[in-house]
Image (cartoon, rainbow, N blue to C red):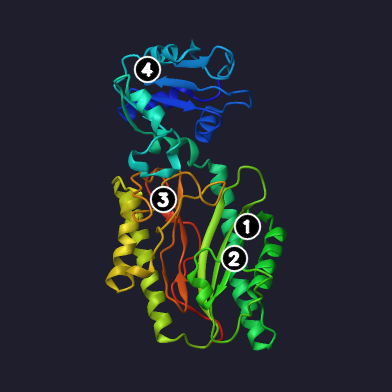
Amino acid sequence: MSFNLSDMQTDLRAAKLDGWLFYDFRGRDPIAHRILQLPDGMRTRRWFYFVPAKGTPKKLVHKIETASLAAVPGDTLYYSAQEELRSNLKKLIGRAKKIAMQYSAKNQIPYVSMVDAGTIELVRSTGVKILSSADLVQKYEAVWSPGQLESHLYAGKHVDRIVAEAFQRAARGVRENRPETEHGLQQWIREQFAAAGLTTEEGPDIAVNAHASDPHYAPSTDRPTPIKQGDLLLLDVWAKRNIPGSVYYDITWVGYLGARPPEKISKVFTTVRDARDKAVDLILESIAKGKPLQGWQVDRAARRVIEKAGFGKYFFHRTGHNIGTSVHGNGANMDGIETHDVRHLIPGTCTSVEPGIYLPEFGIRSEVNVYIGEKEARVTGAIQKELLALLA
C-alpha cells in the first residue's frame, strides 16, 4: 500500500468529510502524486482517485492507461468517451455529500489550488459539495518526524553560531579598515555551512541600508557593496543539514555598524521586535490552551503592532511561512495580507515569524522559528532582544 489508508480515513471522519477526491492531468497536481506516493509512469489522460471516509477507495482511469493508478488500493472504473467519464465519476463519488479536493475558494490559499475551475464544475455537477483539502494536505506535506525536528535543531545550533560570527567578522572589517562586502560575507557564510555539514538551496541574504528594504535582496559580484561604519546590516540566513529528509532553520538578525544606533533605527527595531513577540506569544498561548489558531490570526497580531506605531504601509509581506524540506514549506503560512490563510497551526509543523518594516533608507526584519508540539509551542533557537551595536 502506498499510503496509510486507515489513517487518512480517520482524518476524513475527524474533518466531517465524506471523502477526498484526488485528480490530476499531466502532472498538474504534484501534491496528489506525493500524498499517494505514486511512482513515475505514463499518465497522459485524466485520472481520479476517491478515498471515502469509510469503505473501499475507487479509481477512474482511461482505458488505454489502465495501470496508471495500480500502485494505490481500490476498485477501478474505466472511461473512454466523455459521457462515460461523467457517468463513472458519479459512480466514483457515490453517495458522498461533502468531499475535499486540492481547491481553495477564490484562490484564497493558492498553495493548494491545483484543480482547474472546469474540473471543479464537472465534479460539482454530480451534486457533491467541494471543500478545500488545505488542512488535510498539511498533515501529509508539512508534519515533521522526530528525526526532522532533530535535524532542524542541529541546523539551528550551527546557524545561530555562524550568524554571530558573521556580525563579528563585519565589525572587524570596519575596525581594521578592510571592510567586508555583502557578497563576500555571503560566500564566507556558505563556507561555514559546508564545514558544519549544512546546505541551502540559495542565499543567504546579506543587505545593508536600503538594500535591506528589499526582503528578497540577493548580494552579487555585480554589486560589491562594502559594509561600512554607520551601516545597518541585515542577515537573513537559512540552511538545513546536508542529509536526505532534513528540514530548514531560517532566521533574520540585524546589527548596526557603530557604537550606538540612531534613534530612528532603534525605534523601528523595537516596533518590529514587539510585533514578532506579539505573534509568537499568540501561538504559544493558543497551543498551550488547546485553542484552534489559523495563520491569518497570527499575521493580524503582528500587523496591528506595526500599524499602531504608524508603519503599517511599510510592512508589505506576510508575517511568516511554513518551514519544511524546502525553506518555504507546504503548511499554514502566517498570512492575512497576501492571502487569507485559514489553515490551522497543527502539531508537528514549524513556522517562521518575521515581521518587517521597510523604509526607503533602511529595512529591518526579525525572524524566529516556532515549532508546534502536541500541547506546547516553542521558539527553536536564539531570539534577538536588542539591536546589535557592533562597534560598541
* Residue 380 horizontal/vertical position (percent): 49, 57
Give the mark, 3 or 2, whose residue is nearer the N terminus: 2
Q: Residues within 10 Å of mark 3 (few under 14, many from 20)?
A: many
Q: In front here: 118 or 47? A: 118
Residue hosting label 4: 93
Q: Compared with residue 57, is residue 244 higher up or lower down, i.e. above or below?
A: below
Give the mark, 1 or 3, whose residue is nearer the N terminus: 1
Q: CA distance from mark 3 to mark 4?
A: 31 Å
Residue hosting label 1: 202
Tag 2, which secondary structure? loop
Residue 92 sits in quarter: top left
Q: CA distance from mark 2 to mark 4?
A: 49 Å
Q: Nearer the viewer, mark 3 or mark 4?
A: 4
Tag 3, which secondary structure? loop
Q: Visible in this render: residue 11? A: no
Q: Compared with residue 231, is residue 358 higher up or lower down, i.e. above or below?
A: above
Q: The disc labelled 4 sits on which kind of residue?
A: Ile
* Residue 354 horizontal/vertical position (percent): 44, 62
